[in-house]
Image: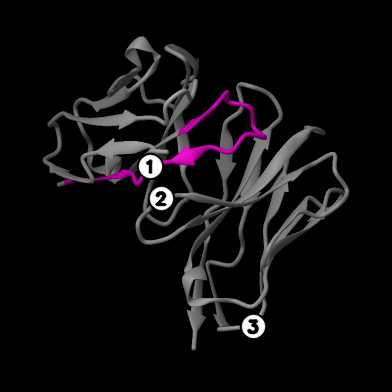
Amino acid sequence: AQTVTQSQPEMSVQEAETVTLSCTYDTSESDYYLFWYKQPPSRQMILVIRQEAYKQQNATENRFSVNFQKAAKSFSLKISDSQLGDAAMYFCAWGMTGTASKLTFGTGTRLQVTL
Amino acid sequence: EAGVAQSPRYKIIEKRQSVAFWCNPISGHATLYWYQQILGQGPKLLIQFQNNGVVDDSQLPKDRFSAERLKGVDSTLKIQPAKLEDSAVYLCASSPNGDAGTEAFFGQGTRLTVV
C-alpha cells in the first residue's frame, strides 16, 4: 500500500520570504503522479502543483516549485515570496497513473504567514 | 464554469441516526469521488464512480455507508446508522476521466458532527 508522510504539522513564514514544506512517500510503483493541494478554511481543496514521476524536471507554477527526488521518494514544495493568502493547510498526495486512480494524502502541514 | 456543489455545508445528528449528503459534479465529468477527512488527517477515499459504475469502494464501511450515482451525474452518500467516529468532513470531487494526471476538482465539503 502507498503511504504519504508529512513530518511538519505546522510551519511559519514571514511575508515575502521563502518556505519549504516536506513530503516523503513509499510506493513500489514506477509510474505515478505527485501533487500538492492547498486547503483554506473554506475546506475546498485546490491543486497547487503536479509532478509526473517519469519527468526528471521539477515542476514550477509561478511562486510554487517542487524538489522531486525519485530515488529518495521525496517531494518538497517551495513557496517563494510568501503572501498572506498562502496561509492554509497543505497536503501532499500520490496517485498511480491510470484511469482508476485514487489519491492517497498525507496528514497535512498548516502554514502560517506572518507580517 | 460552475464548480462541484455539495449540500448541506454542516450537519449535526445524534448517534444511530441516519444522514445523507448530496454532490453535483462539474458538468461532463465522468469520475466522481467521495472522501472522508477526519480532523487532523488527510482525506481518505471512500468510493469512486466512473459514470454510474463503482470503480473502487474498498474503504467504504459497507455495513453503514452507501452511495449511489444515478444517471452518472449527481451522487448521494448515506450513513445509517451513524457512529461518533463518523464525525468528519465529507468531500466530493470530480474529474473528467479519473486519470491520476487529470486535476480533481473538490467541493467545499459537508462537516458532519455526530453527538
Q: Residue at x 36, y 61 (%)?
A: A41
Within the magenta stretch, is there residue B107?
Answer: yes
Q: Specify the subunit that label 2 lies on.
A: A
Mark 1: which secondary structure? loop
Residue B14 sits inside the magenta stretch = no
Q: Position of residue B108 (x, y in %)?
A: 35, 46
Residues at marks 3 and 1, CA–CA distance in whole angstroms: 31 Å
Residue type for callout 1: Gly
The amino acid beneath tag 2 is Gln
Residue assigned mark 1 = B107
Residue A1 visible (yes or no) = no
Whole-angstrom CA distance, mark 1 to mark 2, is 6 Å
Q: Which quadrant, please, contains the N terminus of chain B? A: top left
Q: What residue sits 58% from the left and 38% below the top?
A: B103
Question: Which region is colored magenta?
Answer: B94-114
Q: What type is the residue that disc 3 sits on? A: Glu
Q: Can residue B92 be seen in this view?
A: yes
Q: Which chain carries label 1?
A: B
**For the residues bearing labels 3 and 2, Cβ distance under 8 angstroms:** no
Q: Earlier in the sequence, mark 3 or mark 2?
A: 3
Residue ID at (78%, 32%): A29
Residue A17: mark: 3
